[in-house]
């Protein structure tokens, strides 16, 4: 299991992903799930993955090495895609192809090969966009009404995003809220854990403003966790005690 979120606000895009993957409580490993494809000044694309590791890694490899277009027979890669919509369609094709390869040998044994991906970024001349892509290769796009998408173990972090993020939220505040959402998930689910990868792309910058990994020794993240806990305690203490006396009626 994993948790990844993408937040698309007026000023830019934030992507956050944990790195934990496990095959049981005694077999926990760390794998990068946030991948960045960048040619500064021309394009920046970010891909976060959740679900079966062999399918997601296979899809990433296909996107790097290229897929043959069945109509033109041209080998297509993310770095050649003319726009974000065409890039998202290419990601969908890579997922379908990787799923077909992995599924041939494993699904008969009852192994799940489902994946979901967040794919966002901007190519020069086009808009900054964010998509959620499913195993079948189909996708939905993030909108201003709900300016974030999540994959993986999303239920613990969703209430924070629902209450705090809007399209006009400052992009650095969006990053902060996303980190709080990730911390809440880590606290409530053992299958999500540090380190986490974060990336921030400002609209029309065409180069990643932030791309880094946060681990347990990161001073800002430790302070954020402590500050959020203190703020929650102060908030609930400030709310009046319920007036109910236990009598029916």
Image (cartoon, grey):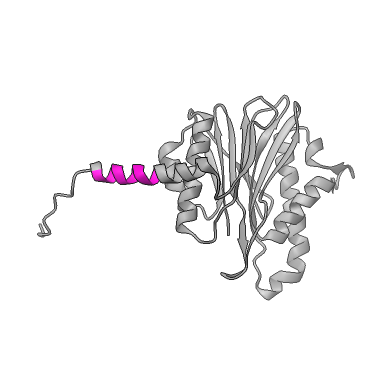
Residue 162 falls in image quadrant = top left
Which is nearer the eye, 224 or 180? 224
**In this rendering, is residue 212 above or below 122?**
below
Residue 123 falls in image quadrant = top right
Which percent across, then down, holds residue 222?
A: 48, 45
In the rendered image, the quadrant that contains the N terminus is bottom right
In the rendered image, the quadrant that contains the C terminus is bottom left
Whether residue 61 appears in this view of the structure is yes
Which percent across, then down, holds residue 217?
A: 55, 48
Left or right: 181 as drawn, with respect to 64:
left
**In this rendering, is residue 231 above or below 216?**
above
**In this rendering, is residue 189 above or below 39?**
below
Residue reaching furthest to the right: 73
Which percent across, then down, holds residue 192?
A: 54, 57
Q: Residue at x 56, y 26 (%)?
A: 11
- Magenta stretch: dominant secondary structure: helix
Q: Residue at x 64, y 31 (%)?
A: 209
Whether residue 146 appears in this view of the structure is no
Left or right: 4 as drawn, with respect to 225:
right
Which percent across, then down, holds residue 88?
A: 70, 42
- The segment highlighted magenta reads 228-237
Left or right: 3 as drawn, with respect to 161:
right
Residue reaching furthest to the bottom: 109
Q: Is residue 230 magenta?
A: yes
Q: Residue at x 55, y 50 (%)?
A: 216
Which is nearer the eye, 133 or 161? 161
**In this rendering, is residue 8 above or below 153?**
above
Left or right: 59 as drawn, with respect to 223:
right
Q: Is residue 64 magenta?
A: no
């Amino acid at each position: 299991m994993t948790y990844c979120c993408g937040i698309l606000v007026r000023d830019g895009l934030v992507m956050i992903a944990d790195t934990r993957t496990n095959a049981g409580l005694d077999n926990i490993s760390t794998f990068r799930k946030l991948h960045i494809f960048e040619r500064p000044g021309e394009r920046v694309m970010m891909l976060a993955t959740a679900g079966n590791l062999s399918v997601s890694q296979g899809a990433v490899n296909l996107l790097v090495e290229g897929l043959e277009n069945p109509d033109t027979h041209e080998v297509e890669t993310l770095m050649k895609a003319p726009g974000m919509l065409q890039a998202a369609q290419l990601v969908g094709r890579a997922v379908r192809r990787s799923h077909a390869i992995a599924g041939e040998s494993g699904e008969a044994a009852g192994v799940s090969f489902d994946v979901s991906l967040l794919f966002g970024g901007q190519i020069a001349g086009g808009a900054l966009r964010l998509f959620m892509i499913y195993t079948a290769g189909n996708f939905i796009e993030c909108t201003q009404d709900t300016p974030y998408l999540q994959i993986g173990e999303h239920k613990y972090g969703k209430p924070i995003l629902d209450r705090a993020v809007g399209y006009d939220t400052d992009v650095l505040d969006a990053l902060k809220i996303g980190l709080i959402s990730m911390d809440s998930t880590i606290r409530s689910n053992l299958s999500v854990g540090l380190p986490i990868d974060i990336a921030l792309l400002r609209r029309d910058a065409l180069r990643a403003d932030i791309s880094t990994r946060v681990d347990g020794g990161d001073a800002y993240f430790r302070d954020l966790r402590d500050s959020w806990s203190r703020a929650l305690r102060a908030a609930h203490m400030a709310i009046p005690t319920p007036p109910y006396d236990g009598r029916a009626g």
